[in-house]
Amino acid sequence: MVIIALLRSSVIIIAVLLLKYFNLLGKTGNELSVWYILPILCTMPLNMMKESFHRILLADSQYKKGNKLSIIYSTVTPLTVFFLVVIFKMGFVGVIISIVASNIINFIVTFIFVNSLYGVSDFSKPYNKIFIKDVFHYGIRGWIGDIAVTTNNRVDQLILGYFLPSASLGLYSICGSIGQILWILPGSIRHILFNKNAGLEKEVDRKTLTSRYHAFFMVTGIVITIGFIVMAKFIVGFLYGKDFLPATVPLQIYLIGTGVYIGTMILTKYFGAAKQIIINSYIQLFSAAIGLITAFLLIGKYGIIGAALSSSLSYIASYFLALYFFKDFKMLINGFVLFFKKGIAA
């Protein structure tokens, strides 16, 4: 886990530095001094190890501890920003310090949680060559998908920053902040689904369970998505003020994609539990490719609306490919029938 986390962070650090060197970070990124970027990049390995340790807890069904950590993660950064920027008036330097401090604090807290359970700091444990080989074989295949997910969630902003001024990027960031709220519930439950699926021996049982969860989250997700789309103008105005209302239409377009992507989040847990992690990577790579191509085609002409449309298309594409790999459409339909008759516990 630690070695894979270090490899992941190394790739990201090198990629960011190369983009900065060739002035490919867009108008906003190119204006930043490298001395602002380096401190954040230096804590990237800690952030990656934190994610790996957090996944250990979820994989062992330690959801209570995992949720506690998630709450800590969501509060540390806002608190540090508030103290350094609002109270101590440190401006942009305060933002950089708060990000670095948050990465360090979150890593330390996560390490303490995980070490108390599994003794990860005990290096006297015997070296298992076969286990390490299996971890790398499985982890690298999944890592490809993780990179694609990160790329897909950020490529629209990167290209938008390249074509348009930072004000447009600020407006568009609202789409991501609000649109991805739809993922909170399925994002927390899908870890339980993964563990349940991994414990089942028969493929038909895994597909049946996945179909029921898929039906539940797609139905509830569609309802919530429609509600967000209808209330988009009010939500933007309430959270950000009337000056940000131009983000309403892009947000509505973006919400369509994030709503559909809920299905992808559920189906990919089936492939992971069935030890077909490479399929998840295929899905995310395909989605990222669609997002990249459509972003270049649409953002230059339509601005933030084009960026929102690009993201939605990539999320929808990932769902259709996940359906293709799942193959058993009849079982998915039966999942909806059982849901409407008896609920998710059927």
Image (spheres, helix red, strand yellow):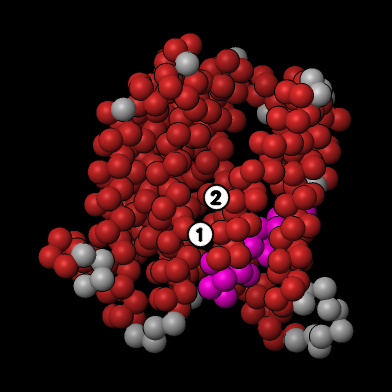
Where is residue 146 shown, x and y percent of the image? 57, 55
Q: Give how far apart the Cα atoms at labels 2 and 1 are.
A: 7 Å
Q: Is residue 119 above or below residue 218?
A: below
Q: Badge 1 local density, few (<14 within 10 Å), some, or many (20+)?
A: many
Q: Is residue 143 above or below residue 275?
A: above
Q: Residue at x 21, y 72 (%)?
A: 346
Q: Amino acid at mark 2?
A: Ala
Where is residue 142 shown, x and y percent of the image? 57, 64
113 with respect to 174 (left or right): right
> Majority secondary structure of the magenta segment?
helix
Q: Amino acid at mark 1?
A: Ser
Q: Residue at x 70, y 76 (%)?
A: 117
Q: Is residue 98 above or below residue 270?
A: above
* Element type at mark 1: helix
Q: Write down the quadrant of residue 42 in the picture.
A: top right
Where is residue 272 shown, x and y percent of the image? 47, 69
Image disc number at residue 281: 1
* Element type at mark 2: helix
Q: Residue at x 59, y 51 (%)?
A: 71
* Region rendered in magenta: 45-63
Q: Badge 2 local density, few (<14 within 10 Å), some, or many (20+)?
A: many
84 with respect to 217 (left or right): right
Image disc number at residue 235: none
Q: Earlier in the sequence, mark 2 or mark 1?
A: 2
Magenta stretch holds residue 49: yes
- CB atoms at circles 2 and 1 under 8 Å apart? yes
Residue bearing the label numbered 2: 148
